[in-house]
Image (cartoon, helix red, strand yellow):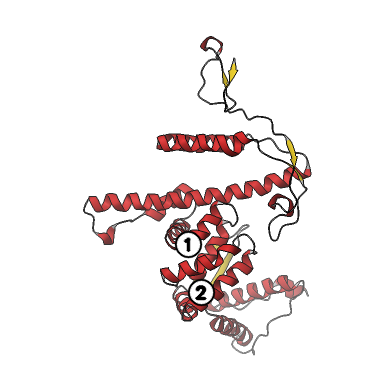
Amino acid sequence: MTTTQYGVEDRDASTLPAATDTPTVAFLPTPPVTVPAGSPAQVGSPGRGPVLAAVPAPPALLTADLVTLLGELASWDEAAGTSMLTAVRDALRELPTARSEGVCVARIAVLEEIKAAVTAAQVRQAVAFRTARLDRETAEGIPASRQGKGLGDEIALARNESPFAGSRFLGLAVALNDSMPNALAALTAGRVNERAVGLLRSEVETLSEPDRERVDTALAPEYGDLPIKELTARARALAYQADPGTVLKRFEKAVSERRVSVRPAADGMAFLTALIPTPQAFACKKALRDAAATANTTPTEGGVEMPLFYGSPAQQAAQQTAWLADHANDRAGGVVPRMPRSAAQA
């Protein structure tokens, strides 16, 4: 019995166990080391607290040889690459839970970087999927106006999300690949996450491709060093410098997407949401309050004033909104308005 350079035992065929459908992956022991002062694992990322210095460092097998081996296998055969991803997924499923505080926090940080790297891999795959589909449809003579139909839906199915979210992710992937290479590199390295690059993309969406590239280049040194809020504010400022008209373009785009929606919630409740310009939102609320205050309880009685509500500010706002909704519903159905139970008891 011998051990190869990758730590795999080489045994005679007579000593091998019976073949199984599930491959077994064995990892070498991980020696504990001390993280150098100032390293990301010690000081943490912006917005996070510092972690303990004593964390395990992966052996060279995991950091170099195995990575190279996986890359070579994936380049030989696309199916082998998919199998490697499946093996990594299964290995994470079987990862034992650490007990020491330092290792727990270190693993959380590394897993967060893995999530970002996985998102970056999905970005590249989404772009490759789009390119392959468009090339095939072009070769088949499908008109350009009909090419790429349903791409977002298929990506949504693969990511287990809504068609709208799938189309949005495809748009993000194309933007990162075509005009935001530094953001994509930071995502691949785990320095930013999917939410951060999504917000960045929205800030530069109305810019031309050259302007987006300039903003991305200017932000490159700051990826991973600034919290998301500061990073998006910085991107907004750079976008305005590149094209002052971008503010008006963003406003016009937002106005064109105004909508009112109802989203189910738990326990028989629902969210009634109006995404409208700020002046219209205040005017709408005032109109609702005025309508509720001037509604008649009977043909001969005067106006009804909104009752007092009690509790926390959030509870008062919820009671007020519910009362306004009941009032509007009653008026539409010709029913005498009701006093809410909480207000009547008060």
> In the picture, which quadrant includes the N terminus?
top right
Which residue is found at the position 52% from the left and 55% from the top? 185
Does dot 2 land on a helix, a strand or a loop? Answer: helix
**x and y percent of residue 281 in the render?**
56, 80
Q: Closer to the camera, 282 or 171?
A: 171
The amino acid type, in three-letter code, at marker 1 is Met
321 relative to 123, above or below: below
293 relative to 231, above or below: below
Q: Closer to the camera, 260 or 228?
A: 228
**x and y percent of residue 34 in the render?**
76, 43
Relative to 146, is 64 on the left or the right?
right
Which residue is found at the position 62% from the left and 36% from the top? 60
From this viewpoint, is residue 205 visible?
no
**x and y percent of residue 98 in the render?**
73, 38
Q: Earlier in the sequence, mark 1 or mark 2?
A: 1
**x and y percent of residue 190 in the render?**
59, 52
> In the picture, which quadrant includes the C terminus?
bottom right
From this viewpoint, is residue 79 visible?
yes
Q: CA distance from mark 1 to mark 2?
A: 13 Å
Which residue is found at the position 62% from the left and 57% from the top? 266
Q: How many marks?
A: 2
Farthest-out residue, left? 141
The quarter of the picture where residue 325 lies is bottom right
The residue at which mark 2 appears reads as 239
The residue at which mark 1 appears reads as 180
Which residue is found at the position 61% from the left and 50% from the top? 113
* Mark 1 nearby-residue class (10 Å; few <14, some 14–19, many ≥20): many
Does dot 1 land on a helix, a strand or a loop? Answer: loop
The amino acid type, in three-letter code, at marker 2 is Ala
* Mark 2 nearby-residue class (10 Å; few <14, some 14–19, many ≥20): many
